[in-house]
Image (tube, rainbow, N blue to C red):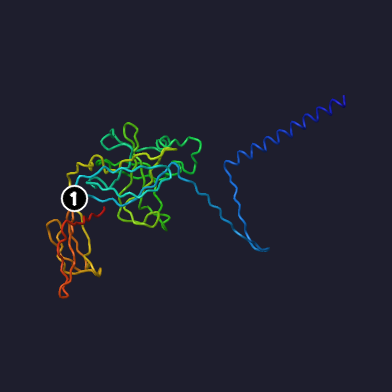
Protein backbone atom coordinates (compact mmCIF):
# COMPACT_ATOMS: atom_id res chain seq x y z
CA UNK A 1 0.00 0.00 0.00
CA UNK A 2 2.84 2.41 0.85
CA UNK A 3 4.59 1.44 -2.36
CA UNK A 4 1.43 2.24 -4.34
CA UNK A 5 1.14 5.68 -2.71
CA UNK A 6 4.77 6.47 -3.54
CA UNK A 7 4.13 5.53 -7.17
CA UNK A 8 1.03 7.72 -7.27
CA UNK A 9 2.96 10.65 -5.79
CA UNK A 10 5.73 10.33 -8.38
CA UNK A 11 3.11 10.24 -11.13
CA UNK A 12 1.46 13.41 -9.82
CA UNK A 13 4.79 15.21 -9.41
CA UNK A 14 5.92 14.19 -12.89
CA UNK A 15 2.71 15.39 -14.45
CA UNK A 16 2.98 18.66 -12.54
CA UNK A 17 6.57 19.23 -13.67
CA UNK A 18 5.63 18.41 -17.26
CA UNK A 19 2.80 20.95 -17.16
CA UNK A 20 5.11 23.60 -15.75
CA UNK A 21 7.63 23.01 -18.54
CA UNK A 22 4.89 23.09 -21.19
CA UNK A 23 3.45 26.33 -19.80
CA UNK A 24 6.90 27.94 -19.62
CA UNK A 25 7.78 26.99 -23.21
CA UNK A 26 4.38 28.12 -24.43
CA UNK A 27 4.80 31.40 -22.62
CA UNK A 28 8.20 31.98 -24.20
CA UNK A 29 6.80 31.27 -27.67
CA UNK A 30 3.87 33.61 -27.03
CA UNK A 31 6.08 36.41 -25.70
CA UNK A 32 8.47 35.92 -28.59
CA UNK A 33 5.88 37.36 -30.96
CA UNK A 34 5.87 40.60 -28.94
CA UNK A 35 9.49 40.85 -27.90
CA UNK A 36 12.87 40.82 -29.56
CA UNK A 37 16.49 40.46 -28.64
CA UNK A 38 19.07 43.18 -29.05
CA UNK A 39 22.82 42.75 -28.63
CA UNK A 40 24.69 45.84 -27.48
CA UNK A 41 27.99 46.38 -25.71
CA UNK A 42 28.29 49.30 -23.33
CA UNK A 43 31.49 50.40 -21.66
CA UNK A 44 30.48 51.46 -18.18
CA UNK A 45 32.02 52.42 -14.90
CA UNK A 46 30.95 51.66 -11.37
CA UNK A 47 28.80 54.36 -9.78
CA UNK A 48 27.51 55.68 -13.12
CA UNK A 49 23.88 55.59 -14.29
CA UNK A 50 23.27 54.93 -17.99
CA UNK A 51 20.20 55.29 -20.13
CA UNK A 52 19.76 53.19 -23.29
CA UNK A 53 17.03 53.98 -25.79
CA UNK A 54 15.87 51.18 -28.09
CA UNK A 55 13.88 51.99 -31.24
CA UNK A 56 12.16 49.55 -33.56
CA UNK A 57 11.58 50.34 -37.24
CA UNK A 58 9.29 48.36 -39.50
CA UNK A 59 8.83 48.32 -43.24
CA UNK A 60 5.46 49.86 -44.02
CA UNK A 61 4.21 46.87 -45.98
CA UNK A 62 0.66 48.20 -46.37
CA UNK A 63 1.52 51.84 -47.02
CA UNK A 64 3.23 53.84 -49.75
CA UNK A 65 4.34 57.46 -49.61
CA UNK A 66 3.81 59.88 -52.48
CA UNK A 67 4.84 63.52 -52.79
CA UNK A 68 5.68 66.10 -55.43
CA UNK A 69 4.72 69.38 -57.02
CA UNK A 70 1.51 69.49 -59.04
CA UNK A 71 1.26 71.99 -61.92
CA UNK A 72 -1.44 72.97 -64.42
CA UNK A 73 -1.28 73.10 -68.21
CA UNK A 74 -4.40 74.25 -70.08
CA UNK A 75 -2.85 74.44 -73.54
CA UNK A 76 -1.75 70.89 -74.33
CA UNK A 77 -3.16 67.39 -74.49
CA UNK A 78 -1.86 65.68 -71.38
CA UNK A 79 -0.99 62.09 -70.61
CA UNK A 80 -2.95 60.34 -67.90
CA UNK A 81 -1.16 60.59 -64.56
CA UNK A 82 -0.37 57.05 -63.45
CA UNK A 83 1.91 55.83 -60.67
CA UNK A 84 2.73 52.22 -59.74
CA UNK A 85 3.06 51.61 -56.01
CA UNK A 86 4.12 48.73 -53.78
CA UNK A 87 4.04 48.47 -50.01
CA UNK A 88 6.98 50.32 -48.49
CA UNK A 89 7.49 52.62 -51.49
CA UNK A 90 8.20 56.32 -51.09
CA UNK A 91 7.95 57.99 -54.49
CA UNK A 92 8.26 61.50 -55.83
CA UNK A 93 5.88 62.22 -58.71
CA UNK A 94 5.01 65.58 -60.27
CA UNK A 95 1.58 65.31 -61.93
CA UNK A 96 0.32 67.79 -64.51
CA UNK A 97 -3.42 68.50 -64.70
CA UNK A 98 -5.51 70.71 -66.94
CA UNK A 99 -7.99 71.70 -64.25
CA UNK A 100 -8.05 72.14 -60.49
CA UNK A 101 -9.72 74.29 -57.88
CA UNK A 102 -13.30 74.54 -59.11
CA UNK A 103 -14.68 73.14 -55.85
CA UNK A 104 -11.53 72.69 -53.80
CA UNK A 105 -7.87 71.89 -54.30
CA UNK A 106 -8.35 68.15 -53.91
CA UNK A 107 -6.10 65.56 -55.53
CA UNK A 108 -7.39 62.01 -55.92
CA UNK A 109 -5.16 58.91 -56.05
CA UNK A 110 -7.17 55.76 -56.74
CA UNK A 111 -7.22 52.46 -58.60
CA UNK A 112 -10.56 53.63 -59.99
CA UNK A 113 -10.40 56.01 -62.98
CA UNK A 114 -12.60 59.05 -62.46
CA UNK A 115 -14.98 58.12 -65.30
CA UNK A 116 -15.69 54.76 -63.61
CA UNK A 117 -16.67 56.18 -60.23
CA UNK A 118 -20.20 55.16 -59.21
CA UNK A 119 -22.25 57.76 -57.37
CA UNK A 120 -23.14 58.72 -54.74
CA UNK A 121 -19.75 59.03 -53.08
CA UNK A 122 -19.61 58.99 -49.29
CA UNK A 123 -17.16 58.93 -46.40
CA UNK A 124 -15.07 55.79 -46.01
CA UNK A 125 -14.61 54.00 -42.70
CA UNK A 126 -11.53 52.52 -41.10
CA UNK A 127 -13.09 49.09 -41.61
CA UNK A 128 -13.25 49.80 -45.36
CA UNK A 129 -9.52 50.53 -45.47
CA UNK A 130 -8.63 47.53 -43.29
CA UNK A 131 -10.56 45.26 -45.64
CA UNK A 132 -8.80 46.85 -48.63
CA UNK A 133 -5.29 46.22 -47.25
CA UNK A 134 -6.18 42.77 -45.81
CA UNK A 135 -5.20 43.95 -42.34
CA UNK A 136 -6.48 40.72 -40.77
CA UNK A 137 -3.81 38.61 -42.49
CA UNK A 138 -0.98 37.20 -40.42
CA UNK A 139 2.12 39.32 -40.88
CA UNK A 140 0.37 42.68 -40.87
CA UNK A 141 1.69 44.54 -37.83
CA UNK A 142 -0.79 46.26 -35.55
CA UNK A 143 1.49 49.30 -35.68
CA UNK A 144 0.60 49.69 -39.36
CA UNK A 145 -3.12 49.24 -38.89
CA UNK A 146 -5.39 51.88 -40.47
CA UNK A 147 -7.09 51.94 -37.07
CA UNK A 148 -3.89 53.42 -35.64
CA UNK A 149 -3.39 55.75 -38.61
CA UNK A 150 -6.62 57.56 -39.43
CA UNK A 151 -6.97 59.36 -36.11
CA UNK A 152 -8.39 62.61 -37.53
CA UNK A 153 -11.23 63.78 -39.73
CA UNK A 154 -11.40 66.31 -42.53
CA UNK A 155 -13.94 67.74 -44.96
CA UNK A 156 -13.60 67.03 -48.67
CA UNK A 157 -15.49 69.14 -51.23
CA UNK A 158 -16.57 66.74 -53.98
CA UNK A 159 -18.39 68.50 -56.79
CA UNK A 160 -19.64 71.16 -54.38
CA UNK A 161 -20.80 68.71 -51.68
CA UNK A 162 -18.90 68.66 -48.40
CA UNK A 163 -18.12 65.17 -47.07
CA UNK A 164 -16.63 64.64 -43.61
CA UNK A 165 -14.37 61.59 -43.61
CA UNK A 166 -11.42 59.86 -41.93
CA UNK A 167 -7.99 61.46 -42.34
CA UNK A 168 -4.45 61.67 -41.04
CA UNK A 169 -1.48 64.00 -41.42
CA UNK A 170 1.88 62.98 -42.85
CA UNK A 171 5.25 63.72 -41.30
CA UNK A 172 7.13 66.98 -41.86
CA UNK A 173 10.82 67.34 -41.04
CA UNK A 174 11.42 69.25 -37.80
CA UNK A 175 7.68 69.93 -37.53
CA UNK A 176 6.33 67.22 -35.21
CA UNK A 177 2.86 68.79 -35.15
CA UNK A 178 2.74 69.85 -38.80
CA UNK A 179 -0.64 69.72 -40.55
CA UNK A 180 0.26 70.96 -44.04
CA UNK A 181 -0.19 67.56 -45.71
CA UNK A 182 -3.19 65.34 -45.11
CA UNK A 183 -4.42 61.97 -46.38
CA UNK A 184 -8.12 61.12 -46.56
CA UNK A 185 -10.41 58.42 -47.97
CA UNK A 186 -13.79 58.43 -49.72
CA UNK A 187 -15.86 55.51 -51.04
CA UNK A 188 -18.08 55.28 -54.13
CA UNK A 189 -21.38 53.41 -54.39
CA UNK A 190 -19.62 50.27 -55.59
CA UNK A 191 -17.28 50.25 -52.61
CA UNK A 192 -14.24 51.49 -54.53
CA UNK A 193 -11.95 53.57 -52.33
CA UNK A 194 -10.83 57.02 -53.44
CA UNK A 195 -7.69 58.13 -51.62
CA UNK A 196 -6.71 61.76 -51.71
CA UNK A 197 -5.00 64.80 -50.31
CA UNK A 198 -5.28 68.57 -50.52
CA UNK A 199 -2.99 70.62 -52.74
CA UNK A 200 -1.17 73.09 -50.54
CA UNK A 201 1.16 76.00 -50.94
CA UNK A 202 4.78 74.84 -50.95
CA UNK A 203 5.63 73.38 -47.55
CA UNK A 204 8.38 71.28 -45.98
CA UNK A 205 7.97 67.55 -46.54
CA UNK A 206 9.14 64.53 -44.60
CA UNK A 207 12.67 64.81 -46.03
CA UNK A 208 13.03 68.58 -45.82
CA UNK A 209 12.13 69.13 -49.48
CA UNK A 210 9.44 71.55 -50.65
CA UNK A 211 6.23 70.06 -52.06
CA UNK A 212 2.66 71.15 -52.61
CA UNK A 213 1.30 67.68 -51.88
CA UNK A 214 2.42 64.74 -49.76
CA UNK A 215 0.30 61.79 -48.79
CA UNK A 216 0.11 58.12 -47.80
CA UNK A 217 -1.68 55.47 -49.87
CA UNK A 218 -2.87 52.17 -48.35
CA UNK A 219 -1.56 49.16 -50.32
CA UNK A 220 -3.10 45.66 -50.12
CA UNK A 221 -0.73 43.41 -48.17
CA UNK A 222 1.74 41.59 -50.42
CA UNK A 223 0.91 43.67 -53.51
CA UNK A 224 3.57 44.80 -55.97
CA UNK A 225 3.27 47.60 -58.54
CA UNK A 226 -0.43 48.34 -58.23
CA UNK A 227 -1.61 51.04 -60.64
CA UNK A 228 -3.10 54.25 -59.24
CA UNK A 229 -4.59 57.10 -61.26
CA UNK A 230 -4.11 60.71 -60.19
CA UNK A 231 -6.74 63.35 -61.02
CA UNK A 232 -8.62 66.35 -59.67
CA UNK A 233 -12.26 66.59 -58.62
CA UNK A 234 -14.01 64.07 -60.93
CA UNK A 235 -17.13 66.24 -61.16
CA UNK A 236 -15.97 69.86 -61.35
CA UNK A 237 -12.41 69.29 -62.64
CA UNK A 238 -12.73 66.37 -65.09
CA UNK A 239 -9.32 65.50 -66.51
CA UNK A 240 -9.07 66.29 -70.23
CA UNK A 241 -12.36 68.17 -70.23
CA UNK A 242 -11.57 71.31 -68.29
CA UNK A 243 -13.33 74.43 -69.58
CA UNK A 244 -13.16 76.86 -66.68
CA UNK A 245 -10.29 79.30 -66.10
CA UNK A 246 -10.10 81.13 -62.81
CA UNK A 247 -8.31 84.30 -61.85
CA UNK A 248 -5.30 83.97 -59.59
CA UNK A 249 -2.76 86.41 -58.24
CA UNK A 250 0.63 85.85 -59.81
CA UNK A 251 3.77 87.01 -58.03
CA UNK A 252 7.23 86.88 -59.52
CA UNK A 253 10.64 88.39 -59.91
CA UNK A 254 12.69 89.22 -63.00
CA UNK A 255 16.42 88.66 -62.63
CA UNK A 256 19.48 89.23 -64.78
CA UNK A 257 20.43 86.04 -66.62
CA UNK A 258 24.14 86.57 -66.00
CA UNK A 259 24.32 87.99 -62.49
CA UNK A 260 21.02 86.82 -61.02
CA UNK A 261 20.39 90.34 -59.71
CA UNK A 262 16.70 91.42 -59.62
CA UNK A 263 15.65 93.97 -62.25
CA UNK A 264 13.36 96.95 -61.66
CA UNK A 265 11.11 98.77 -64.16
CA UNK A 266 10.95 95.79 -66.53
CA UNK A 267 7.81 95.42 -68.64
CA UNK A 268 6.35 91.92 -68.29
CA UNK A 269 3.83 90.50 -70.78
CA UNK A 270 1.30 88.29 -69.02
CA UNK A 271 -1.07 86.57 -71.44
CA UNK A 272 -1.31 89.61 -73.67
CA UNK A 273 -1.50 92.15 -70.86
CA UNK A 274 1.36 94.10 -69.39
CA UNK A 275 2.65 94.99 -65.97
CA UNK A 276 5.90 96.51 -64.76
CA UNK A 277 8.27 95.29 -62.08
CA UNK A 278 8.10 97.60 -59.10
CA UNK A 279 10.17 97.21 -55.95
CA UNK A 280 11.87 94.28 -57.67
CA UNK A 281 8.60 92.30 -58.00
CA UNK A 282 5.67 92.15 -60.36
CA UNK A 283 2.09 91.20 -59.60
CA UNK A 284 -0.76 90.66 -61.99
CA UNK A 285 -4.18 89.02 -61.84
CA UNK A 286 -4.67 86.66 -64.73
CA UNK A 287 -5.66 83.05 -65.21
CA UNK A 288 -2.55 81.77 -66.96
CA UNK A 289 0.82 83.43 -67.04
CA UNK A 290 3.58 82.90 -69.61
CA UNK A 291 6.92 84.61 -69.30
CA UNK A 292 9.53 84.35 -72.04
CA UNK A 293 12.42 86.78 -71.94
CA UNK A 294 16.18 87.07 -71.74
CA UNK A 295 18.12 89.81 -70.01
CA UNK A 296 20.96 91.40 -71.99
CA UNK A 297 23.34 94.23 -71.17
CA UNK A 298 24.04 96.95 -73.78
CA UNK A 299 25.91 100.10 -72.79
CA UNK A 300 25.21 99.31 -69.13
CA UNK A 301 21.46 99.21 -69.85
CA UNK A 302 19.50 96.06 -69.07
CA UNK A 303 16.80 95.12 -71.54
CA UNK A 304 14.51 92.15 -71.99
CA UNK A 305 14.09 90.46 -75.36
CA UNK A 306 11.83 87.51 -76.23
CA UNK A 307 13.15 83.98 -76.21
CA UNK A 308 11.86 82.03 -79.25
CA UNK A 309 9.70 79.00 -78.48
CA UNK A 310 10.39 79.25 -74.77
CA UNK A 311 7.81 79.83 -72.07
CA UNK A 312 7.37 79.27 -68.37
CA UNK A 313 3.88 78.78 -66.96
CA UNK A 314 3.41 80.07 -63.43
CA UNK A 315 0.50 78.81 -61.37
CA UNK A 316 -0.06 79.56 -57.69
CA UNK A 317 -1.96 77.43 -55.17
CA UNK A 318 -4.38 77.70 -53.67
Q: Position of residue 144 (x, y in %)?
A: 46, 43
Report the residue that reaches farthest toward the right: 2
> Which of 179/109 is in front?
109
Horizontal side of residue 12 vs 116, given as left or right: right
- x then y, percent, for residue 317: 26, 53
Q: Where does the image place residue 315, in percent across and percent down from the top left?
A: 23, 54
Residue 263's place in the image compared with 120, above or below, is below
Q: Residue at x 15, y 58 (%)?
A: 308
Q: Residue at x 58, y 46 (%)?
A: 36
Q: How many marks?
A: 1
Q: Can you name the residue that lies furthest to the front here?
A: 308
Residue neighbourhood size for the residue with mark 1, other residues' Cα within 10 Å, grouped as few (<14), some (14–19), many (≥20): few
The image quadrant that residue 127 belongs to is top left
SS at circle 1: loop
**Quadrant housing residue 225:** top left
- Identity of the residue furthest to the top in this view: 1
Q: Is residue 15 left or right of residue 28?
A: right
Place of residue 20 in the rendered image (x, y in percent of width and height, measured from the top left): 71, 36
- Residue at screen point 22% across, 62% down: 252
Give the answer, above or below, for where 86 lies relative to 277. above
Residue furthest out toward the bottom: 299
- Residue for badge 1: 246
287 or 102: nearer the viewer? 287
Location of the N terminus (image quadrant): top right
Amino acid sequence: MARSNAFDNKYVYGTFVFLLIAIAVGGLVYLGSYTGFVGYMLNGSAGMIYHIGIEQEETAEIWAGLNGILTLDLFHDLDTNIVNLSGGDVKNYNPVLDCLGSSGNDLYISETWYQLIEYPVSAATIADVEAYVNASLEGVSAHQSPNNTYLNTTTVNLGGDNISTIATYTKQKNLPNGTDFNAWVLKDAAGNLLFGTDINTLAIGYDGGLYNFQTMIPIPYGSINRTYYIYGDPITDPFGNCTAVFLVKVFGMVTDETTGAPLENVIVNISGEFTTTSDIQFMHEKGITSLSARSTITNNTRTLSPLPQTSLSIITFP
